[in-house]
């Protein structure tokens, strides 16, 4: 039986990180609808999904079908944050999936990333004193900020 409260409490944003398969090491936004009773996520700037299917958590280019870049056989994990087994991730050079003990899914906390850069022009109103911008951090997650200068 899936713990519905746990599924509902999953973070809106997560980060995948590890040694292998840099392509999937980015930020993911939670989809509006769950997939197979568990939360599902889409990479912020790529067509890559993190989801649960049958007894496996997968990261792949299509939700619920096709190949995968990484997977974790953990049918007990209700959320990707609970995965307690070693992920298998694509070793691009060897063209094969192999265990990556460093691979993990973590919750993204606003403000944890100091590598923010502006994605466009800063906008200002009222003689440049009220400032706002959309910033992108190292995991491609957009962060809207507003501040008053002066």
Image: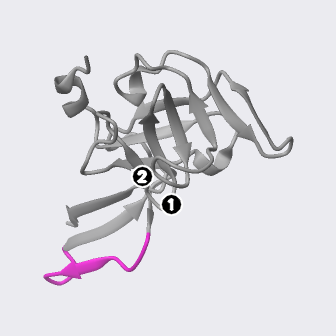
Q: 111 or 126, which is in the foreground?
A: 111
Q: Residue at x 46, y 46 (%)?
A: 64
Query: Residue 100, percent across and down?
Result: 68, 26
Helix, strand, or loop for circle 1?
Answer: loop
Residue sitting farthest toward the right: 94
Q: Does the magenta stretch include residue 90?
A: no
Q: Residue at x 65, y 21 (%)?
A: 101
Q: 131 or 62, which is in the foreground?
A: 62
Q: In this view, does 70 lie to the left or right of 123?
A: right
Q: Are marks 2 and 1 in contact (CB under 8 Å)?
A: yes
The residue carrying pointer 1 sits among few (fewer than 14), some (14 to 19) or many (20 or more) residues within 10 Å by Cα, namely few
124 is higher (above) or lower (below) than 38: below
Q: In this view, does 75 lie to the left or right of 104?
A: left
Q: In which image quadrant can residue 6 be found? A: top left
Question: What segment carries the magenta color?
Answer: 119-129
Q: Name the residue under label 1.
A: 47
Position of the C terminus, as image quadrant, is bottom left
């Amino acid at each position: 039986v899936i713990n519905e409260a746990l599924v509902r409490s999953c973070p809106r944003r997560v980060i995948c990180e590890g040694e292998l398969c840099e392509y999937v090491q980015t930020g993911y936004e939670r989809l509006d609808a769950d997939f197979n009773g568990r939360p599902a996520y889409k990479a912020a700037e790529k067509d890559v999904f993190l989801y649960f299917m049958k007894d496996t958590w997968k990261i792949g280019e299509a939700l619920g079908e096709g190949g995968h870049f990484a997977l974790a056989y953990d049918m007990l994990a209700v959320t990707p944050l609970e995965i307690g087994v070693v992920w298998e991730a694509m070793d691009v050079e060897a063209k094969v999936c192999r265990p990556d003990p460093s691979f993990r899914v973590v919750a993204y906390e606003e403000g944890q990333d100091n590598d923010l850069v502006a994605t466009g022009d800063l906008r200002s109103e009222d003689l440049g004193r009220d400032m706002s911008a959309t910033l992108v951090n190292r995991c491609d997650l957009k962060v809207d900020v507003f501040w008053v200068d002066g």
